[in-house]
Image: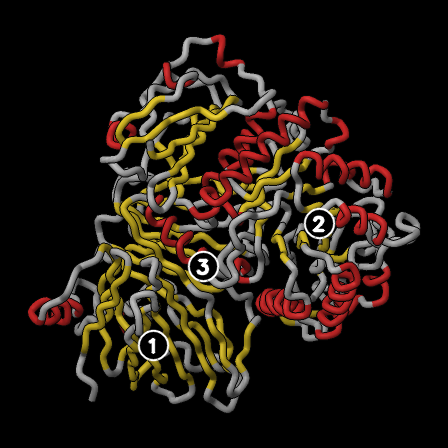
C-alpha cells in the first residue's frame, strides 16, 4: 500500500503541489505563487487539509477533487471521464494508482509527474501527466485506454485545476470575422461558466484564454490563473464554483454524440491543457511566450518581411502586374513574396476550383516558373496559398469523389463561402492532398504556404462511416501538415482561417506564423493584436500594412499609423504598391528599415501592455537585459481627457538612466507638430528608469488614428 505523499513542483516563481496516494488519481491541492521549500510540518498540514470537511449534502466521507474529477468525489461538474459500454460503466472509479515522479536533471528541465491507474472494472486504464515547464507554465493531459473486449464509447475527458476563493472575476475572449478576440468579463458565481466551441476549428470567437483573478485584475496588477485548451477542433473550457465555495478551471475536447468509440486496446489522449499563473495578465502571458520561444522549432530572429498579393490583385492573376508588384516589393525591402488565392485550375472567383490543386494553364500558360524565377532573381522567397481542407462543389475533385466530402451521406452540408469541407481523415483524400501539395512545393522549392481554412464544419459526418468526424479531421490535418513538412523540411507554414480563426497551442506546433485577422484596418488591428498576443508572441502574428483605405472597413489612415501598428508583429504588406506614390514607397522603405533594425527586440523582448484610458492603446517591448525598449502609443478614439494621465512605462531597471526619443522616418507627415505637445515629443532626453515607470511620460495630444513609436535605450 503506497503511503500518501506530497509532490512539490516549482519553477520560475510558481509552485504546484500534488498529493499522490494509492487508490486515487493525482490531486492538485495548490497552484500559484512559489511556496519555497516545504518542511515536514507543512507537508503534513497539506496532507491533512487535502481531505475536505463534510458539509450539508456532501458524502459522509468527503473526498478531494482530483485532476480528473470523478463522481465518487461528490463532483457535480463535468466528469473527468464520461463514457459507457452500451449504457454500462457510466461512472469511472479509478483504483490501484501508482505515481511515478522523475525529478529534473538540470534546472532547465521540466518537472514531471505521471500517474497510472485502472478503473475498478479492470477495463479502463488511465494515465495522467502533470508537467511544470521551466517558464512556470503548467500543463496537464490524460490518456484513456480500453482494456476491455468490447468498444468503449467516450463522451469526454476533462481535466480540472483548482483556483483559490479570492479569484472571483473571470475574463475570456470572443469576437467575429474581422473583429477577433474581444475581451469580456463577468463575476465568478456558483455554477458553471461554460464556453463551448462546435465550429470544428478554434474559431474567431474562441475563449482563447479563460482567466480567473482577484477583483479588478489587469495587465500589471492582480493575481490571475489562466487556462488554454491546446486543440484546434471542437472544445470546451469552463470555470466551476461549487455551492461549497470550491473553484476550478477545466477543459476538454468536445465530442459529438457517438463520435469516438475506443476499440479494445485503443487509446485516446486529451489535448494538453495549459495553465499560467501570474501577478497580472502580462506575467501570465509572458510564461506562454517564454515556453514557445525555447522550442527548437521556433522561428529564428529576423522574420522575413512579407508581401501578400491578395488585396493587390485578388483573383485577377496574370504575370505582368505580379512582376511589377514583385519589383516594387523588393524596392521597399520585402523578403518574401506570397501568391494568394487564384492560381489553380478554374479559380477565377470563390465559387469554383477549390480542391483542384493544379496550376491553371489558361492563366499561367508557362506555369508558375516565370514568376517564381523572377521573384528569386530579386533575392526574395516565394510563397503560395492553399486551402487544403475545403472544396468547391464546382470542382473536378468534388465531382469525382463525393465520398471525400465531410457531410451527411444523403446530402451536402450547407454551403459556407461557396465551399464544403474535405474529409482529411479519408485515407485517399489525405494522400491526394499530401501528394499534390508536396509535388508543387518541391517542383518550385516553394518556401512558404499560407494555409487557409475559411469555414466552420457544419454537420461534419464521415460519409464512409456515418459517424461525426471533427476529432479525426483535426488529427488528420495535424498529420497532413507533419507529413508535408517531413517531405519539405525547408517549408514554413502560416495558419490562416478566415483571418484569425485557428490560433491555438495545438496548431502552433506545426506552423511558423498566424494570420491574425483579415482586417488590415490598423485601428481594428490595434485591438485585435493586443489580445491575440496574450497567447502568441508578436513574431508569430502576421501584421501587414494595408492600403490607405482599408478594404474591409473603408476607413482611411496614414502610413505612419499603419506602419507603427504592423511593427509589433511579423511585419508585412497587403497593399497594391502600384498605387503608391514615390514618396509613399520611400516612407514605407524607411519604416521597413526600422523594422529590420528592431527585429531582435520585437521578436524576443518581453511585451508589456501599458495602462491608458480606453481611447489609447500603449505597449512596450523590453529586452531581457532591460537595456533597450520600444513603446508604441496609438489613439483609437477621442480621449475623454486632454492631455490625460501620465504614460507609465514598465520592465526597465529602476536605477539605470535611459535615453528617450520619438522615432520618425524621412518623409512621414507629422500632423501632431501643430499642437502643443510635451517637451519630449520633439527633443530626446535622459532620466532614471524609476521615473519612467513610477512618474511616466506626459501624454501627447493625439487624434484618433494617430500613433507614435518611442525608443528607450540605456544612456
Of tags 2 and 3, the one toward the viewer is 3
Q: Is residue 234 visible?
A: no
Q: Cα distance, mark 2 to mark 3?
A: 26 Å
Residue 195 position within the rendered picture, expressed as x and y whole percent measured from the top left: 45, 52
Going from the N terminus, do you reach mark 1 or mark 2 first?
Answer: 1
Mark 3, residues whose alpha carbon is within 10 Å: few (<14), some, or many (≥20)? many
Query: Extreme left residue here?
Result: 41
Whether residue 345 is visible, yes or no, is yes
Give the label, 3 or 1, closer to the camera.
1
> How far apart are the alpha carbons under marks 1 and 2?
44 Å
Q: Please tell me whether residue 262 is drawn above or below residue 617 in the rendered image.
A: below
**Pointer 2 local density, CA inside 10 Å: few below 14, some 14–19, many at least 20:** some
Q: Position of residue 456 (x, y in %)?
A: 63, 53
The residue singled out by tag 1 in the image is: 114
Give the residue at x 65% y 38%. Answer: 333
Q: Which residue is mark 3?
A: 229
**On-image quarter of the N terminus:** bottom left
Q: On the image, which quarter does residue 388 sit in?
A: bottom right
Q: Is residue 306 left or right of residue 300?
A: right
* SS under mark 2: loop
Crowd class of label 1 (few under 14; some 14 to 19; many from 20; radius 10 Å): some
Q: Earlier in the sequence, mark 2 or mark 3?
A: 3
Give the spatial CA distance, label 3 vs label 1.
20 Å
Residue at 42% of width from left, 34% of height from top?
630
User: Which residue carries the number 2 mark?
Assistant: 416
Label 3's element? strand
Secondary structure of the residue carrying numbered label 1: strand
Amino acid at each position: 500500500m503506497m503511503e500518501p505523499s506530497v509532490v512539490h513542483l516549482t519553477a520560475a516563481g510558481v509552485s504546484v503541489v500534488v498529493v499522490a496516494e494509492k487508490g486515487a488519481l493525482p490531486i492538485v491541492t495548490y497552484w500559484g505563487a512559489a511556496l519555497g521549500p516545504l518542511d515536514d510540518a507543512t507537508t503534513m498540514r497539506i496532507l491533512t487539509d487535502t481531505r475536505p470537511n463534510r458539509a450539508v449534502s456532501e458524502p459522509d466521507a468527503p473526498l478531494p477533487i482530483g485532476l480528473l474529477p470523478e463522481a465518487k468525489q461528490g463532483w457535480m461538474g463535468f466528469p473527468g471521464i464520461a463514457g459507457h459500454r452500451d449504457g454500462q460503466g457510466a461512472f469511472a472509479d479509478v483504483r490501484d494508482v501508482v505515481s511515478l515522479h522523475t525529478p529534473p536533471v538540470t534546472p532547465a528541465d521540466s518537472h514531471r509527474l505521471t500517474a497510472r491507474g485502472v478503473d475498478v472494472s479492470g477495463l479502463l486504464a488511465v494515465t495522467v501527466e502533470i508537467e511544470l515547464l521551466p517558464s512556470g507554465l503548467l500543463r496537464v493531459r490524460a490518456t484513456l485506454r480500453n482494456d476491455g473486449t468490447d468498444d468503449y464509447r467516450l463522451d469526454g475527458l476533462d481535466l480540472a485545476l483548482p483556483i483559490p476563493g479570492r479569484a472571483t472575476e473571470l475574463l475570456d475572449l470572443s469576437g467575429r470575422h474581422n473583429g477577433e478576440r474581444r475581451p469580456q468579463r463577468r463575476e465568478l458565481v456558483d455554477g458553471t461558466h461554460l464556453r463551448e466551441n462546435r465550429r470544428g476549428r478554434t474559431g474567431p470567437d474562441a475563449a482563447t484564454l479563460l482567466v480567473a483573478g482577484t477583483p479588478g485584475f489587469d495587465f500589471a496588477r492582480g493575481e490571475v490563473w489562466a487556462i488554454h485548451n491546446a486543440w484546434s477542433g471542437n472544445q470546451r473550457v469552463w470555470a466551476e464554483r461549487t455551492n461549497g465555495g470550491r473553484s476550478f478551471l477545466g477543459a476538454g475536447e468536445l465530442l459529438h454524440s457517438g463520435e469516438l468509440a475506443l476499440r479494445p486496446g485503443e487509446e485516446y489522449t486529451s489535448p494538453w491543457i495549459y495553465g499560467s499563473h501570474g501577478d497580472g495578465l502580462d506575467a501570465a502571458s509572458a510564461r506562454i511566450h517564454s515556453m514557445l520561444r525555447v522550442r527548437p522549432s521556433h522561428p529564428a530572429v529576423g522574420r522575413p518581411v512579407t508581401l501578400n498579393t491578395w488585396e493587390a490583385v485578388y483573383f485577377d492573376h496574370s504575370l505582368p502586374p505580379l512582376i511589377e508588384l514583385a519589383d516594387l516589393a523588393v524596392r521597399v525591402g520585402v523578403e518574401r513574396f506570397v501568391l494568394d488565392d487564384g492560381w489553380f485550375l478554374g479559380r477565377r472567383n470563390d465559387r469554383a476550383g477549390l480542391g483542384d490543386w493544379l496550376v491553371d494553364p489558361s492563366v499561367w500558360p508557362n506555369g508558375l516558373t516565370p514568376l517564381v524565377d523572377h521573384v528569386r532573381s530579386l533575392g526574395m522567397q516565394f510563397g503560395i496559398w492553399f486551402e487544403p481542407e475545403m472544396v468547391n462543389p464546382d470542382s473536378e475533385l468534388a465531382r469525382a469523389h463525393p465520398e471525400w466530402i465531410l457531410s451527411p451521406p444523403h446530402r451536402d452540408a450547407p454551403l459556407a463561402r461557396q465551399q464544403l469541407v474535405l474529409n482529411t481523415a479519408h485515407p485517399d483524400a489525405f494522400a491526394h492532398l499530401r501528394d499534390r501539395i508536396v509535388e508543387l512545393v518541391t517542383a518550385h522549392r516553394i518556401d512558404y504556404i499560407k494555409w487557409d481554412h475559411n469555414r466552420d464544419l457544419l454537420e461534419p459526418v464521415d460519409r464512409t462511416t456515418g459517424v461525426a468526424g471533427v476529432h479525426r479531421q483535426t488529427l488528420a490535418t495535424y498529420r497532413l501538415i507533419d507529413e508535408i513538412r517531413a517531405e519539405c523540411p525547408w517549408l514554413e507554414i502560416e495558419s490562416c482561417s478566415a483571418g484569425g480563426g485557428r490560433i491555438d497551442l495545438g496548431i502552433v506546433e506545426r506552423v511558423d506564423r498566424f494570420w491574425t485577422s483579415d482586417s488590415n484596418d490598423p485601428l481594428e488591428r490595434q485591438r485585435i493584436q493586443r489580445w491575440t498576443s496574450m497567447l502568441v508572441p508578436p513574431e508569430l502574428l502576421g501584421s501587414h500594412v494595408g492600403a490607405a483605405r482599408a478594404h474591409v472597413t473603408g476607413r482611411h489612415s496614414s502610413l505612419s499609423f499603419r506602419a507603427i501598428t504592423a511593427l509589433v508583429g511579423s511585419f508585412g504588406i497587403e497593399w497594391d504598391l502600384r498605387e503608391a506614390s514615390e514618396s509613399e514607397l520611400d516612407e514605407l522603405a524607411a519604416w521597413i528599415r526600422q523594422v529590420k533594425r528592431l527585429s531582435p527586440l520585437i521578436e524576443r523582448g518581453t511585451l508589456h501592455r501599458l495602462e491608458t484610458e480606453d481611447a489609447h492603446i500603449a505597449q512596450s517591448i523590453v529586452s531581457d537585459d532591460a537595456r533597450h525598449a520600444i513603446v508604441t502609443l496609438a489613439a483609437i478614439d477621442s480621449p475623454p481627457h486632454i492631455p490625460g494621465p501620465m504614460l507609465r512605462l514598465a520592465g526597465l531597471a529602476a536605477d539605470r538612466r535611459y535615453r528617450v526619443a520619438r522615432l520618425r522616418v524621412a518623409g512621414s507627415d507629422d500632423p501632431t507638430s501643430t499642437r502643443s505637445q510635451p517637451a519630449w515629443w520633439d527633443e530626446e532626453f535622459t532620466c532614471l528608469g524609476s521615473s519612467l515607470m513610477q512618474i511616466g511620460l506626459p501624454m501627447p495630444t493625439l487624434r484618433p488614428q494617430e500613433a507614435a513609436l518611442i525608443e528607450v535605450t540605456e544612456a
